[in-house]
Image (tube, helix red, strand yellow):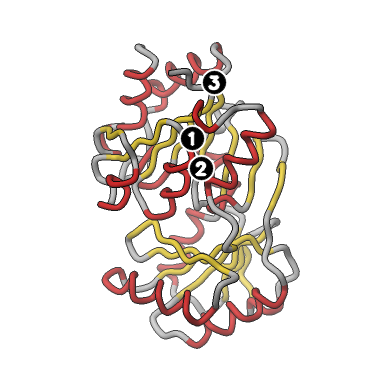
Amino acid sequence: MTIKLVATDMDGTFLTDDKHFDVERFRRVYDYMTKNDITFVSASGNQYYQLKNFFSEFPKTLFVAENGALVGSHDEIYKTDTFTADVIAKTIRVLNSLDDVQSIMCGEKSAYIEKNVTPEFYKTSKFYFPEITSVDKLEDVNDGVLKFSISCPMDETEAYMEKLSDMIGLEVSVVTSGHGDIDVIRADVNKATGLDYLSEKLHIQPDEMCAFGDGGNDLEMLRYVGHGVAMKNASPIVHQTAPFETVDNNQQGVIQHLEELFEL
């Protein structure tokens, strides 16, 4: 099997629970991939600017950010997939009507958060969205919108996903990485569409790709590639989808699997 591209989810996958990875151990793998023309891709629901910070020491990393709505390199944004004005307005109305929900609108230039959110939610949001702007109302923002990131009670995640899907409609897809976090993205956008764009751009076939994931927003990507790997800590549906498994994220399962795959 020839692997020409490796894509990994971040939270619960590449990163440990305390949001770190073994930099020196990964450097060996990254150097091998660079020397052998294997592309490394960070494929995440997180913001492009946060992902660039994680891989500042690894300049050839590519990014499928915002659950596939933005694809780029350290130096250039290749493409974005934004919502129509009507869907933006409808989504904001729905979010404003729901109790126990706090949200971020993720734009091309910045993420946007209303000033009335709780301090705890703002602090958490600032970590995941280094480029973030506080506004009085999301309706006032003038930016291309890539997705909405929503926080709800953890034990009600599935119920809120169904509610959001029913209320907003077929124009959107509602996905979760778990832990009370929900993303509303364009129905025709996901991590697999981001990888498909890179497939055409880099002339790499899907069966020459390897991908790692742990949550529902990784399913399309794991189905798309030739070598899909579930983390030990992944949700049941991920284990059913991916033909391979590695140890959990706190044991650096992505790095370990790549070390085995490349015989390092």
Q: SS class of the residue under badge 1? A: strand
Q: Nearer the viewer, residue 250 or 175?
A: 175
Residue corresponding to mark 1 = 7
Q: For the view shown, which residue lies furthest in the right direction?
A: 142
Dot 1 or dot 3: first in sequence order is 1
Residue 252 in percent (x, y) is at 31, 32
Question: As displayed, is residue 259 above or below residue 61?
Answer: above
Tell me which amino acid carries mark 3: Ile
Residue denoted by label 2: 43
- Going from the N terminus, do you reach mark 2 or mark 1 first? 1
x, y percentage for residue 138? 63, 76
Residue 162 falls in image quadrant: bottom left
Amino acid type, mark 1:
Ala
Residue at image mark 3: 38
Q: Amino acid at mark 2?
A: Ala
Q: Residue at x 47, y 18 (%)?
A: 2
Q: Residue at 48% of width from left, 14% of height from top?
A: 32
Q: What is the C-alpha distance between the residues marked 3 and 2?
A: 15 Å
How dense is the environment of label 1, judged by Cα within 10 Å: few (below 14), some, or many (20 and up)?
many
Query: Measured from the top left, where is residue 11 in percent x and y?
Result: 39, 47
